[in-house]
Amino acid sequence: MAKTNELKGQVALITGANRGIGLAIAERLADMGAKLALCARNAEKLQQVALNLQNRGTEVFSRVADITDLADILKMVNETRAALGPRHSGE
C-alpha cells in the first residue's frame, strides 16, 4: 500500500504488534505516517517487527509488556510519551 501522511505527527500504541491483526494494524498505521509504540510478549519477534518498520522510515518505540497488568500498561504509556510525544499544537 502507498505511504500517506494522513496520521503524520500522531502516535499509535498497538498491543499484540508482533503478529496477526496487531501486526497488520501496525503496518497500515505506519503506511499512514503515524509514529508507533509497539508491545507484545515475545521480545524477539517484537524486535524484528520494530526493525522492519524502522527500515521503512517509521519512528518506533517498542517494549515487552503485559497488558493484563495495570502497572505495566501505565509504564508503557508513560514510556511511549517520553519516546514519541504527543506533540500537539500549543504544547
Image (cartoon, rainbow, N blue to C red):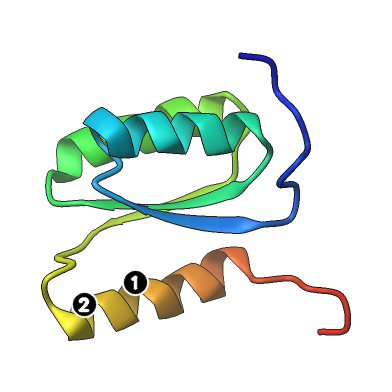
Q: Residue 5 location, x and y as percent?
A: 78, 37
Q: In the displayed structure, does residue 73 sit left or right of residue 2?
A: left
Residue at mark 1 to residue at mark 2: CA–CA distance:
6 Å
Question: In this picture, is 79 found above or below 61?
Answer: below
Q: Residue 47 location, x and y as percent?
A: 29, 39
Q: Amino acid at mark 2?
A: Asp
- Crowding around mark 1 (Cα neighbors within 10 Å: few <14, some 14 to 19, many 20+) is many
Residue 19 lies in what quarter of the image? top left
Q: Residue at x 68, y 39 (%)?
A: 33
Q: In the displayed structure, does residue 81 sit left or right of residue 6?
A: left
Residue 4 lies in what quarter of the image? top right
Label 2 near label 1: C-beta < 8 Å?
A: yes
Q: Amino acid at mark 1?
A: Met
Q: Residue at x 54, y 25 (%)?
A: 55
Q: Which mark is residue 76?
A: 1
- Crowding around mark 2 (Cα neighbors within 10 Å: few <14, some 14 to 19, many 20+) is some
Question: In this picture, is 41 found above or below 84?
Answer: above
Q: Residue at x 11, y 71 (%)?
A: 68
Q: Secondary structure at mark 2?
A: helix
The quarter of the image holding the N terminus is: top right
Q: Which mark is residue 28?
A: none
Residue 83 lies in what quarter of the image? bottom right
Residues 48 and 26: in front is 26
Q: Secondary structure at mark 1?
A: helix
Q: Residue 65 location, x and y as percent?
A: 20, 63
Q: In the displayed structure, does residue 59 sit left or right of residue 87?
A: left
Name the residue carrying label 2: 72
Q: Residue 2 location, x and y as percent?
A: 69, 15
The quarter of the image holding the C terminus is: bottom right
Q: In the displayed structure, does residue 42 sit left or right of residue 87?
A: left
